[in-house]
Image (cartoon, rainbow, N blue to C red):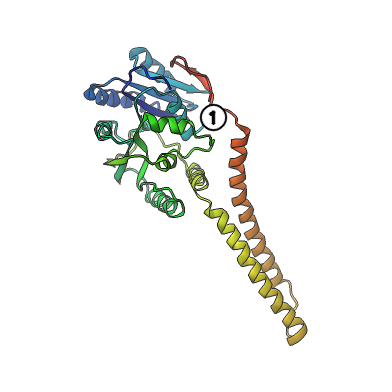
Amino acid sequence: MINNGIDISIIVPMHNEEGNVNLFYQRTSNTLKQLKISYEIIFINDGSKDNTQALIYQLSKQDEAVKYIDLSKNFGHQIAVSAGLAHASGNAVVIIDADLQDPPELINSLYHKFSEGYDVVYAKRKKRQGESAMKLWTASLFYRLLKKITNVDMPLDTGDFRIISKRIVKILNNMPERNKFLRGQISWVGYNQSYVEYDREARQNGDTSYTYSKMIRFALDGITSFSDIPLRLVTYLGLFISVVTGLLTLYALYSRFISKIYTAGWTSLMIVILFFGGVQMIAIGIIGEYLSRMNDDIRQRPLFLIKKTNLEDKSTDV
């Protein structure tokens, strides 16, 4: 990571955000100009199918502070952010989405709090507008569950919107795992962390690409990255089933040879077979999730590939 005297880098992952590009740029650049510091805005086009990259390219011709990384395909939000972290040059780095739910104007408050000597200042949501009750409930449940089952003190009601120091960026870039859960990794590193509260706004334009299936995958990445409890539960469940099976076996033998009271039939047998078969499939699935992540790390394929960028002296992949 090269430092060209830039005070702050803004990392903006984008996927089909053509309706928000120009407005986001205007609000962000106006905020940064008020701080009177040197800055760069790095847009990461994560395989958009609309005119997102074309609009970013136009902005880069108008403003030399606008940088872009055009990825070869859609790698996902966390990988897009990681691409930005690998190429950011600022002494401080802000991670923010382009949908304007997180107001760029809050960067001012984050930077002033950061200047007090913190390594991480995250934006903590007081209210969340424009989101369904189901999404709010599932998000709240996930973060509280994750806080319970991991040894990472992850702040509640926060996303990726935050400012971090160059020291934290360097640590994140050196973390080898391929299935990224950045907000968990940032909490894990420790150092001095604080927060600024705000009200999250509704999405300005377009539809979110964060479907429920992607949310479930994101939740699995978070849980498997920072907790071994699911594996322990499989072990405990196996021990419990073994005990129950032993007791049922003793009962069956007693009924057959001592009490002589038993009923031949397939119903009870099928229930037992289906129950234990289901438990075994769940256990195999949990183990498989961990093995899949290990396999991703062992293969050591590039985390992302860059099709085009206006950043100098950078490799095309990491």
> Where is residue 143 drawn, in percent x and y?
41, 49
Q: Residue furthest right?
A: 257
Neighbourhood count class around disc 1 (C-alpha, 10 Å): few under 14, some 14–19, many 20 upward: some
> Where is residue 253 drawn, in percent x and y?
74, 79
What quarter of the picture does the N terminus occupy?
A: top left
Residue at 64% from the left image edge and 53% from the top image edge: 284
Residue 302 to residue 185: above or below: above
Residue 50 to residue 283: above or below: above
Residue nearer the viewer, 84 or 71:
84
Residue nearer the viewer, 145 or 140:
145
> Where is residue 184 drawn, in percent x and y?
43, 42
Dot 1 falls on a residue whose secondary structure is loop
> Where is residue 243 drawn, in percent x and y?
64, 70
Residue nearer the viewer, 83 or 200:
83
Q: Residue furthest bottom?
A: 259
Determine the image quadrant of residue 201: top left
Residue 102 to residue 231: above or below: above
Residue denoted by label 1: 303
Looking at the rendered structure, the number of numbered marks drawn on it comes to: 1
Q: Does the image show residue 66? A: yes
Determine the image quadrant of residue 85: top left
Mark 1 is on which residue type? Leu
Q: Does the image show residue 260? A: no
Residue at 58% from the left image edge and 41% from the top image edge: 293
Q: Residue furthest top?
A: 61
